[in-house]
């Protein structure tokens, strides 16, 4: 398992290069024929390197990309966006078993980071709104002008400034605002299909965010189906298909080729409907 994250002096220069260089998989002994060790990709997986700040995992549903990403999040000791420790999250029990079979090669330990699933965002939004409401309620219990009233109102306003009213905006708007607020130079961010419910325009905005964090020394590993996200400059793409994990160029991805062919001649695809 990965070592625990240690705090660094904020004045220290950021380390160069990616934080997580690679993960290696070693099948459990004695062999385990239960999930997640029955995932087809594990039969061929020895080492998965991360040579660039942005890495994508792409494949059909059931290919194992989300399971692998969850195990990496557990092994890296990341928290979910909402603050739940992956070591205790009840939904990640299988991921913890797989993480125990992974070995991590670190360039340096990431200073900050989180693991994001779509459901984590909605939970984070709910908790943030409840926190603001609770602080407003507590402030009302103190006389206006009192120290306690001012502190509580100030804290509520600070949360609003940082995140806004997340439930009042679209999933894409809220996620982008949260990600911009939470990303830090040198961080490690694992995102499971963040493009869910994103418009094409919001996906382009997320590409810009990813490109920005890479320039600021952060690293992201992302599971996605989106041809737009996958076009992020300078990224590494792994295609999970037929039990293999292979590096692939963006233009050679089946999803990219299909999208391009459809846009060039949609009638050829729709005439038989």
Image (spheres, grey):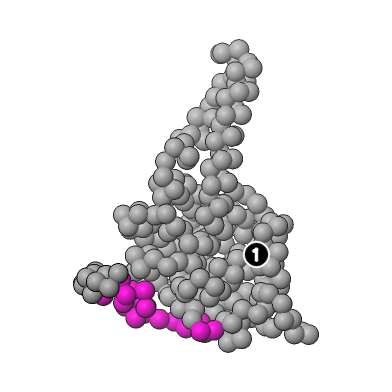
Q: Which residues are magenta?
A: 242-261
Point out residue 186 in the picture as x, y percentages from the top left corner. Answer: 51, 60
What residue is drawn where x is 41% and y is 45%? Answer: 170
Residue 59 painted magenta: no
In the visual, does 213 lie left or right of 87?
Answer: left
| Foreground of the two, 149 or 30 | 30
In the rendered view, tell whether residue 222 sits above or below residue 251.
above
Residue 79 in percent (x, y) is at: 62, 55
Q: Secondary structure at mark 1?
A: helix
- Residue 207 x, y percent position in the rendering: 36, 60
- To which quarter of the image does residue 224 belong? bottom left
Q: Is residue 140 visible?
A: yes
Whether residue 216 appears in this view of the structure is: no
User: How many numbered circles does the render carry?
Assistant: 1
Q: Which residue sits at x=67%, y=71%?
A: 99
Q: In this figure, which residue is indicated by the disc labeled 1?
A: 74
Identify which residue is drawn at 61% across, 86% down. Answer: 43
Q: Nearer the viewer, residue 14 or 207?
A: 207
Residue 259: within the magenta? yes
Name the residue located 67 percent from the left edge and 78 percent from the top edge: 37
**Label 1 neighbourhood size at 10 Å, few (<14), some (14-19), many (20+)?**
many
Residue 161 against residue 262 in the figure, above or below: above
In the drawing, does residue 185 fall left or right of residue 141? left
- Residue 171 lies, in percent from the top left, at 44, 48
Q: Quadrant of the C terminus?
A: bottom left
Figure check: 76 above or below 261: above
Q: Nearer the viewer, residue 211 or 11?
A: 211
**Vertical order, 172 against 103 (above or below):** above
User: Considering the image in quadrants, where does the N terminus appear?
Assistant: bottom right
Q: Is residue 218 left or right of residue 254?
A: right
């Amino acid at each position: 398992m990965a070592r625990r994250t240690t705090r660094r002096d904020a004045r220290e220069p950021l380390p160069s290069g990616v934080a997580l260089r690679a993960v290696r998989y070693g099948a459990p002994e004695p062999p385990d024929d239960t999930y997640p060790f029955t995932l087809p990709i594990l039969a061929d997986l020895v080492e998965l390197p991360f040579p660039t700040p942005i890495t994508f995992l792409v494949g059909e549903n059931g290919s194992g990309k989300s399971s692998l990403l969850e195990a990496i999040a557990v092994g890296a000791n990341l928290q979910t966006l909402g603050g739940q420790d992956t070591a205790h999250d009840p939904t990640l029990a299988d991921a913890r078993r797989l993480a125990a079979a992974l070995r991590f090669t670190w360039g340096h330990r990431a200073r900050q980071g989180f693991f994001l699933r779509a459901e984590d965002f909605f939970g984070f939004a709910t908790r943030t709104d409840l926190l603001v409401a609770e602080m407003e309620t507590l402030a009302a219990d103190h006389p206006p002008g009192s120290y306690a009233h001012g502190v509580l109102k100030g804290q509520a306003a600070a949360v609003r400034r940082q995140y806004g009213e997340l439930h009042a905006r679209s999933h894409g708007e809220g996620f982008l605002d949260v990600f911009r607020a939470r990303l830090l130079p040198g961080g490690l961010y694992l995102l499971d299909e963040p493009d869910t419910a994103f418009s094409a325009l919001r996906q382009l905005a997320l590409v810009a965010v990813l490109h920005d964090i890479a320039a600021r020394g952060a690293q992201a590993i992302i599971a996605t189906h989106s041809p737009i996200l996958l076009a992020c400059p300078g990224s590494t793409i792994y295609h999970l298909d037929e039990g293999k994990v292979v590096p692939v160029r963006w233009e050679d991805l089946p999803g990219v080729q299909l999208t391009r062919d459809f846009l060039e001649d949609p009638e050829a695809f729709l005439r038989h409907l």
